[in-house]
Amino acid sequence: MVQLSAVRKAFGARVLIDGANWQVPSDARIGLCGPNGAGKTTLLRMMAGLDEPDAGLITRPTGLTVGYLPQEGLTHTGRTLFEEASEAFDDLLGVQREMRTLEARLGDADIPTTEHDQMLERYSDAQEAFRDRGGYDIDAKVTSVLHGLGFSRAHFDQPCETFSGGWQMRIALAKLLLQSPGLLLLDEPTNHLDLEARNWLEDYLRSYSHAVVLVSHDRFFLDTVATSIVEIDLRKLTTYQGGYSSYLTEREARLERLREQKRRQDEEVARMRAFIDRFRYKASKAAQVQSRVKMLDKVNPIEVPAERKRVRFTFPSCARSARAVIELRNVRKSYGDLTVFDQTTVLIERGDRLALVGPNGAGKSTLMRMFADAEAPDVGERIEGQSVVAQYFAQDEARRLDDTLTVHDTLAAGSPVHMVPAIRNILGGFLFSGDDIYKRVAVLSGGERTRLAVARMLLRPSNTLLLDEPTNHLDIDSTNVLLDALIDYGGTLIFVSHDRYFVDRLASKVLEIGGGDAALYPGNYEEFRLSKLERTQTPPARVRPTTPATPKTATSAANHRKHQADTRREERRRRALESRISELERRIGDRELQVQQLETEMASPDFYTDKVAAQDTITRHQSLMWEVGDLMNQWETLQHEATEKTEA
């Protein structure tokens, strides 16, 4: 596959990679990790051929296709969404265009017989190639990937230029996945994906048949997708087998060994220096002194990566709120013809740790703004409990910072006096060190502004936090600082995050937004997903105060009845699935028989005598081929589902 040999890359005096050797296997799924600025993006760009190493070689096999997704900056214009995504099959679409041209020309009665026969032979070859390479499955594949990444069918005919930056990156990701390159390079592919789209992408990449190298700050995503982790640190590449959690364990064990080797080396060097200093001017020891000087010259100092500080932090104390914190009662919210919520009631109680989930555009941020009283409902009321001290972290919180203040002064302003000594420690946890703390906010990058806004929030007293995607632009270490603080937070927490690990660690309840309403599920995100699978059996509860527990005897009987009902439902589902598979097989067989009959007719020497009839037959043949492709995709999906149920 791709091989790096003694690769070096520097920007001015700053060396990112030096003497790196690495080979990417053809079926690898590799996560790139390392501190901010270590060179992860630079390495991806060199592997994609966009940047060249200063020294060394990057070798790629002849014919290898490489697909690269940058973090941002891609735009698509001039086509509809479906047309743009279909461009991933540009070579196949070229064959299809040739087929259509031949179809039109074959109907011309004035074409000489010899030329007609040659065109007919070429048409047959093109059609066979188109079919063998999956040309009739293009629409089904494009539809599947677009749906997986969160696009609805209503988006398909929408011009690409009408999509925002985050959706533009989804378009680019869709095209890459459909192209299925031999080496897929993804730089933060989950940045603009909601949880459902991330779940879909995890499954897609786990079954991807070629090599994948990716950078992600979502540790759950790395654990699920990556089969190995390559760390960039101290200008070197180090490979660890397994996902991110295994990497953390193995990395710590490796660092312990390095620290011990470094300690022993330092002791040996100290002994040699002491001997040299003691006997430098003693003639009888001259040979031994020179021997040790030469040995010192040959010592290759062991470098140990800097220990990543785990900043522990406690929120400023704040009086408790009343039990009922915030209630939205029978609220309705619309934007033009779009109704986001209709007769929705949500009650937040003290101590709730509530994660808001749902597809992009479902209304999560709208609900957060109504919770925070930053936006009023069109109908209904917002009721706030007594002694509620709330902090609201909006998606655009970074843009609300005062550009004239320094980094340090931004945190000092509005913080309790007793928290001021903790400012430097917190800034270090969010990657602001040394002279960085004296920078003006105006010169910070987007990611730096987000980290600063999160750090500022930690220093302000509150008993209710409303956080709308606080982990955007945070690396794993900074996310851990925030996560640790929120785990210890004693107040009420309502948040939106697309980081699965973050949600699982924090949420005790999940509120699903969609369809103009909000449905509550107890437990973390994994439990929410399991509950959704059983939603047809037990409808999700609307958000209401807790009801008294059911007596044990009643619970036992209810559980027994539920088990019996579940078994009956599962059996009905299995039979229904088998029936659907059988029906699809019947329809596929019927369509394939029709295709064979039409192809026999098209092979007749006098087929093109009647130009109109011939064109109708060709059109019908093409339509049937597309239909067979779509039916085959449906059949494969159902067969996969049936196999999973059997194995379970």
Image (tube, grey):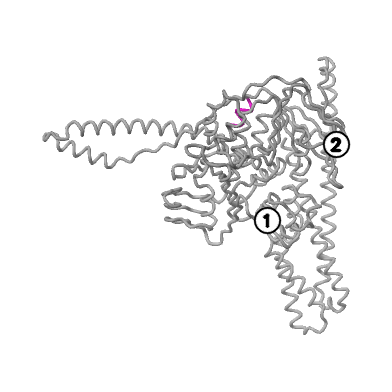
Please state which amino acid type lies under the numbered disc 2.
Answer: Arg
Residue 506 coordinates in the image, percent (x, y): 67, 29
Q: Where residue 195 is drawn, which disc sits there? A: none
Kindly give the residue lying farthest to the front in the view shown. 404
> In the depicted view, which residue is nearer to us: 112 or 192?
192
* Residue 226 in sight from this viewpoint: no
Q: What residue is at 77 percent from the left and 44 percent from the top?
A: 361
Earlier along the polypeptide chain: callout 2 or callout 1? Answer: 1
Q: Where is residue 163 shown, x and y percent of the image?
A: 73, 53
Is residue 484 within the magenta segment?
A: yes
Seen from the viewer's position, the closer of residues 482 and 587 is 482
Quadrant assignment, res 344: top right
> Where residue 563 appears, x then y in whole percent?
82, 26
On whether residue 505 falls in the magenta region, the answer is no
Which residue shows up at 71% across the image and 70% down it? 125
Residue 2 or residue 379, whichever sits in front: 379
491 in relation to 109, above or below: above
Question: Mark 2 and mark 1: span between their CA atoms?
Answer: 39 Å
Range of the magenta residues? 481-487
Report the side of 625 relative to 320 (left or right).
right
**Residue under pointer 1:** 175
| Mark 1: secondary structure | helix
Q: Position of residue 73 (x, y in %)?
A: 63, 54
Q: Amino acid at mark 1?
A: Lys
Q: Which residue position is annotated with label 2?
A: 572
Query: Do labels 2 and 1 touch, CB within 8 Å?
Result: no
Q: Which residue sits at x=35%, y=30%?
A: 263
Image position of 391 with respect to 161: above or below = above
